[in-house]
Image (cartoon, rainbow, N blue to C red):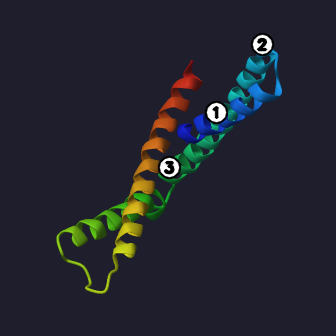
Amino acid sequence: MLGAISAISGLIGKAIDKAFPDKSEANRLKAEIDRQLIAMDFKELESATSVITAEAGGESWLQRCWRPIAMLTFVSLVVAHWLGWTAPNLSEEQTLALLEIVKIGLGGYVVGRSAEKAIKTWKQS
């Protein structure tokens, strides 16, 4: 998500530079926009973390483990394909879609865990 923030910030920054001839005002405005974009990203990460934390602390075994089970299933399908153990009618497009799900899922898990740890540290300080 930080890549998207950088891209948006860069585009907005260029527009502000063209619209405001006063560099100090332009820099102040760009800094404010960057602060708001980061705050929005932080809120999104905080929300995702609270969902994952609630699931991890849930009463049901299935509620706590459905994400890892789903990701292991998709990873197994990708590995099976690489080993040649897949249905002959599975297209390359479908295989790439599975790999994309794995990449998104693992990325979300890593970001979620990182955000969870960061928020815990932030709340303690």
Horizontal relation, residue 47 to residue 25: left or right:
left
The foreground one among 114 and 87 is 87
Q: Name which residue type carries label 1.
A: Gly
The residue under the point 18% across, 75% down is: 84
Q: Pinpoint residue 69: horizontal percent, then vertical percent.
A: 37, 63
> Quadrant of the rendered structure where residue 24 is?
top right
Q: In the structure shown, which secondary structural element does the residue marked by tag 1 occupy?
A: helix
In the rendered structure, which disc, 3 or 2, sits on the residue that comes first in sequence?
A: 2
Q: Residues within 10 Å of mark 3 (few under 14, many from 20)?
A: few
Marking on residue 73: none
Q: Pinpoint residue 90: horizontal percent, then vertical percent.
A: 32, 81
Q: In the structure shown, which secondary structural element does the residue marked by tag 2 occupy?
A: helix
Q: Name which residue type carries label 2.
A: Ser
Q: Which residue is mark 1?
A: 10
Q: Pinpoint residue 125: horizontal percent, then vertical percent.
A: 57, 18
The foreground one among 9 and 107 is 9
Q: Which quadrant, please, contains the N terminus?
A: top right
Q: Pinpoint residue 44: horizontal percent, then vertical percent.
A: 63, 43
Marking on residue 24: 2
In the rendered structure, which disc, 1 or 2, sits on the residue that comes first in sequence?
A: 1
Marking on residue 57: 3
Kindly report which numbered mark, 3 or 2, lies closer to the viewer in this rendering.
2
Residue at the extreme left: 83
The residue under the point 24% across, 65% down is: 79
Q: What is the CA distance from the residue labelled 1 to the residue labelled 3?
A: 40 Å
The residue under the point 56% across, 24% down is: 122
The foreground one among 52 and 25 is 25
Judge whether 64 appears above or below 28 on screen.
below
Q: Name which residue type carries label 3.
A: Gly
Horizontal relation, residue 62 to residue 80: left or right:
right
Horizontal relation, residue 51 to residue 30: left or right:
left
